[in-house]
Image (spheres, grey):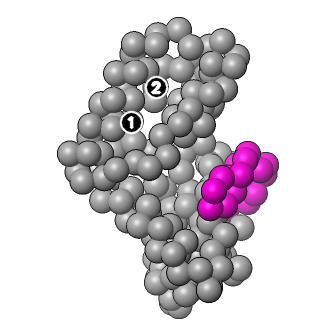
Amino acid sequence: MAGKNTTTTSTYGIKEDVLPKKEYHQAQRLGEGTFGAVCTVYDDEGQMYAMKVFECDEDDETLAKETLREVSLLRLLRARAKEFGILRIIDVYANAQEEICMVMPRLSCNLTEGIERKLVKNKLKIAHSLLTAVLFLHQNGVVHRDIKGDNIMFANDKLESV
């Protein structure tokens, strides 16, 4: 999925001389979202990640700006993100098709799947973790506009780590 580093700048202002950090190979498409797709990818060492691919159209500056805004916010919050259960970005780059690719840890399941599979046991802990994460975002001037079960991810099937 990723190419070798170059010194060009994509249409969306992502400098490709610093990104991507690794070569990624697509394994499985996980789902489709409002702005693109999410798939499982592997690096050359066999480490598994999730990649969110934003299918940007050069004529659609709004989508490109929203995507870059999300990437910028996640980067700004990166220092304390794990402490508050905010997803951390591992890599970001624009590929040859001018899609913006954001690489993140591959997490086990989301809240919707956990409820459907009857894995949710500690509802208060999950609610507390979610509210703590939202409070952290709000304290940093960020409003999450798409809070839903599909976007609340867990590190394992025990739904212990948000």
Seen at 34% across and 50% down, the residue is 143
Is most of the magenta stretch helix, strand or loop?
Answer: strand
Which residue is tagged 1?
85
Left or right: 101 in relation to 80: right
Helix, strand or loop status at disc 2: loop
Q: Is residue 59 above or below residue 25?
A: below
Observer-nearest residue: 126 or 145? 145
- State which tag comes first along the sequence, 1 or 2: 1
* Percent x, y of residue 119: 62, 13
Q: Amino acid at mark 2?
A: Ser
* Percent x, y of residue 45: 65, 52
Observer-nearest residue: 133 or 92? 133
Observer-nearest residue: 47 or 8? 8
Q: Residues within 10 Å of mark 2 (few under 14, many from 20)?
A: some
Q: Amino acid at mark 1?
A: Gly
Q: Is residue 136 above or below residue 161?
A: below
Q: Would you say the residues marked 1 and 2 are in contact, meaning their CB atoms lie under 8 Å apart?
A: yes
Residue 159 on the magenta span: no
- Number of marks in picture: 2
Which residue is tagged 2?
161
Seen at 46% across and 55% down, the residue is 89
Left or right: 127 in relation to 76: right
Dividing the image into 4 quarters, which one contains the N terminus?
bottom right
Seen at 43% across and 20% down, the residue is 126
Dividing the image into 4 quarters, which one contains the C terminus?
top left
Does residue 16 appear anywhere in the picture?
Answer: no
Q: Is residue 66 above or below residue 109?
A: below
Farthest-out residue, top: 121
* Percent x, y of residue 118: 66, 12
Does residue 50 appear anywhere in the picture?
Answer: yes
Q: Which residues are magenta?
A: 22-44
